Image (cartoon, rainbow, N blue to C red):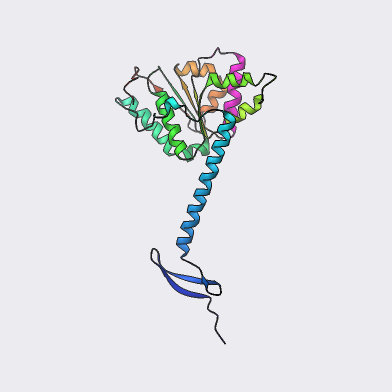
Amino acid sequence: MNTIIKNKPDRCDTHGDFESRNVYKNVWTKCPQCAAEQQAVEQREKEERAAVARFLAWQKQLGEVGIPERFSNRTLGSYVAENEGQCRVLAFAQEYAEHFDTVQKTGRSAIFCGQPGTGKTHLAAGIGLRLMEMNKLVLFTTAQRALRRIKDSWRKDSKESESDVVRLLVQPDLLILDEIGVQYGTKFEENAIFDILNERYEKRRPCLLLSNQTLQEVRSFIGERVYDRLREDDGKCVPFDWASHRGSAA
């Protein structure tokens, strides 16, 4: 009577000796470490395909690109830091992007404020571009554009509701909202900004707010409710307190 062998020693050129199991007649298992690595590769590729599909579906609904073409070359690597302040904000941007998984767990947000031409947009776009390389959903838009889209949803012929607009703005992993404070400061604007940022706050989805105004002016515009939420979980106000260096950043 033939003895059924269920296991036998085998050797993998990469990982060395292992025990192979008989799964069917003359079919034996391969190296378990190779199998695990292949499974990890397939899982990663599956997640990447899902992320691309999610991005394309969201972008189609949104009708905008994640980062405007004008800012598509504003990487963190191309930012020129010539003084202590610029080194400080560059370090913040690099840390924020490289540890974004931790940022997402808490929803840690930030406010970039300072005079025009000090590099706020460059670093915010650089963060966004780095995150998009990591298959994150990123939207860079202006507060005015977001508010205008909400108002457009009120039209009788609009194909989207106000809640649809808010949902699209809440969906991305990072929302970069530029030109905070150039609006009229109406109650509608304050409430609309609150609705967007509060829902993101509740879902722990971080925001970067950019403004050419002082922190106090930004705080007054967005209201204390939003400001308090942005401060939670180590939220930062990052001052760009130097003269314009437009032209010195690539």
The percent position of residue 195, horizontal first and vertical second, equals 61, 25
Using the image as rendered, state which of residue 164 and residue 26 is in the foreground.
26
* Magenta stretch contains residue 198: yes
Q: Main secondary structure of the magenta part?
A: helix
Residue 201 makes an appearance in the image: no
Vertical side of 15 occupied by 51: above or below: above
- Which of the 4 image quadrants contains residue 198? top right
**Image position of 195 (left or right of 237):** right
Direction bottom: furthest residue: 1
Q: Residue at x 47, y 29 (%)?
A: 67
Q: Residue at x 44, y 72 (%)?
A: 10
The percent position of residue 42, horizontal first and vertical second, equals 50, 53
Vertical side of 77 occupied by 145: above or below: above
* Number of disc labels: 0
- Which of the 4 image quadrants contains residue 238? top left
The range drawn in magenta is 179-203
Using the image as rendered, state which of residue 116 and residue 232 is in the foreground.
116
Quarter of the image for the C terminus: give it: top left
Direction left: furthest residue: 82
The percent position of residue 26, horizontal first and vertical second, equals 53, 74
Quarter of the image for the N terminus: give it: bottom right
